[in-house]
Image (spheres, helix red, strand yellow):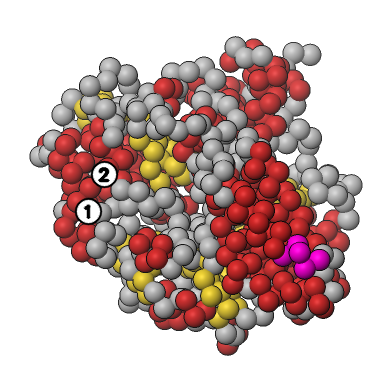
Amino acid sequence: MPFTLSTELQKKFDALKRCYPAPRSPLVPMLLFAQNELGYVSDELIDYLARELGLRRVEVEETAAYYAMLRRRPCGRYHLQICTNIACMLRGARQLLEHIEKKFAVPPKQPTPDGLFSYEETECLGACTGAPALQVNYDYYENLSVARLDLLLEELRAGKKPPPVPFISGVFPDKPHLAEVRVNMRRFTPTPTPSLEHYLKHDGYKALEKALKQMTPEQVIEEVKKSNLRGRGGAGFSAGMKWGFVPKDTTKPKYIIANADEGEPGTCKDRALMEFDPHQLLEGMLIAGVAVNAHQGYIYIRGEYHYVREILDRAIAEAYAYGYLGKHILGTGFDFDLSTHTSAGAYECGEESALMESLEGKRGYPRIRPPFPAVIGLYGCPTVINNVETLSAVPAIILHGADWYAKLGTPGNGGTRMFCVSGHVNCPGIYELPLGFNLRRMIEEVAGGVWQNKKLKAVIPGGSSTPVLKAEETDLPMDFDSLAKAGSMLGSGGVVVIDEDTCMVDVARRISRFYAHESCGWCIPCREGTTWLHKLLERLHTGDASPEDIALVAQLAKNIFGKTFCPFGDAAAMPIISIVEKFRHEFEEHLSYGGCPFARCQMAVMK
């Protein structure tokens, strides 16, 4: 019997093929959308897509094998993905996983005998401020306990689909915080109203009109430069300077890409921005297009953010319907088309060159640089790639002026920053604060202090790839330059708070596991080094190691640092180096004790 698609899936495929100039580009979204309908990526589907896109079968197979969300076998009707990464681990995710393992009594990804459930342990879902969290298919359920999980499973078994837990818990904590200065979040409301009508009532698309009718492209770039807006994805590079690198005299098309592949553990701000105010991102991309004379944009969004992609697609349709996208925008003759592009689970694709490879329908392997994307990027053409938070700040800068925005932060660090405060705090949440806000105040005053009256031990200040700070190092401004002086990084703004009862060897072990799992395997120091780092840390945590292994961990991490094509190797090495240097005594205690001396880890082993 020939393989056929449903009418709905065929419509999606036809729409995808119209979005790209290269026939291979829609491959990954096609695979994911087909899996959503069929349950898994079958051999017949691979054959069909190879014929449809003019590819060899092996090209489709090797691409599908790269992305963690794509499955070659059917799972249960309800597939549970339990996040156990650092923020969820600190809030009890391991207990949820152990409970599921005992309850289902089947291996990961294998359906229960009735075919109803399956499960797997997964990496960060972008729900850090609502930890512990899991997904059922694509639906998020946050702030879970074993009791709440059992209730959820009972309802699913009864044929009821409980409404997903809203993201409000991570954006609107119960306690108001006067320290917040809302720029990117100023349109957020407790009930999401991401409509064009709501956006227009609050200065929506006025900045685009100003950029198109009152400013030259050079003036737009200069205004963004003067604002001291630095990349909010982690690198902290000047956004305006990046735009200025795009050549003006080229005959090639130019592209604007929003990097919404938010995979850095501890980080979930972009998810909130796209859920609560998608038009702000669209307007920022349009202004970037005006600045560099680009006429096509893509929002590259992580596969787990399925419902967020639907919100973005609705916003894009609204913008087309009202003339803010498409031809002759606002009567100026400027054209700009925009679409979303879905990834399928690969942290490496957050790196901009790997992202472009993925958007072209291939594995997300990094490119050697130079050349840089501004000159030779997507499809070999000039490309601007910015993080969602970065682009979302642009409309406010253009509307209110660079000087206004720059003064909100510290010298050289303009504006506000959305900080995702998770882990051991009383009020986890996403808080928009001026750049340079004191970290200790953020923890104690804004996030309600360390939970359960515990003492602070350590803080991860900018996502899992950044070096940790000890408690006594937290009295410092949270901006790019101050964190660099302190030997760490502001990174993605993911602030993970760790209390006194936490085993730092366990923290290092979980972080190293993530990077070993997510390495694309392209560079030998990264592929081999991250795996050996994790193995060594496992041995040290159980006490089955020698004193020389402590030094070996640090040496191995330093041998990865600076020796890979992309920053992934540095991201894997830096937190481990810092934990060994600052908490070496805990590693030594594990060896003398013959295992982990911390009660939380002992309880996990006993279970």
* Residue pictured at 39% horizontal, 74% vertical: 476
Say above or below: 67 vs 181: above
Q: Residues within 10 Å of mark 1 (few under 14, many from 20)?
A: many
Say above or below: 394 vs 184: above
Say above or below: 225 vs 181: above
Q: Quadrant of residue 279?
A: top left
Check disc 2 and give the amino acid type.
Gly
* Residue pictured at 26% horizontal, 65% vertical: 410
Q: Give me the C-alpha separation between circle 2 and circle 1.
A: 9 Å
Of residues 18 and 24, which is closer to you in this image?
A: 24
Return the residue at label 2.
240
Return the residue at label 1.
227
Magenta stretch holds residue 547: yes
Magenta stretch holds residue 461: no
* Residue pictured at 16% horizontal, 57% vertical: 403
Q: Is residue 306 left or right of residue 335?
A: right
Residue 188 on image: x %, y %: 36, 60
Q: Quadrant of residue 76?
A: top right
- Disc 2 and disc 1 in contact, CB within 8 angstroms: yes
What segment carries the magenta color?
Answer: 546-550
Residue 395 on image: x %, y %: 25, 48
Residue 280 on image: x %, y %: 32, 48
Which part of the image, by quadrant, shows the C terminus? bottom right
Q: Residue furthest bottom?
A: 453
* Residue pictured at 69% horizontal, 68% vertical: 505
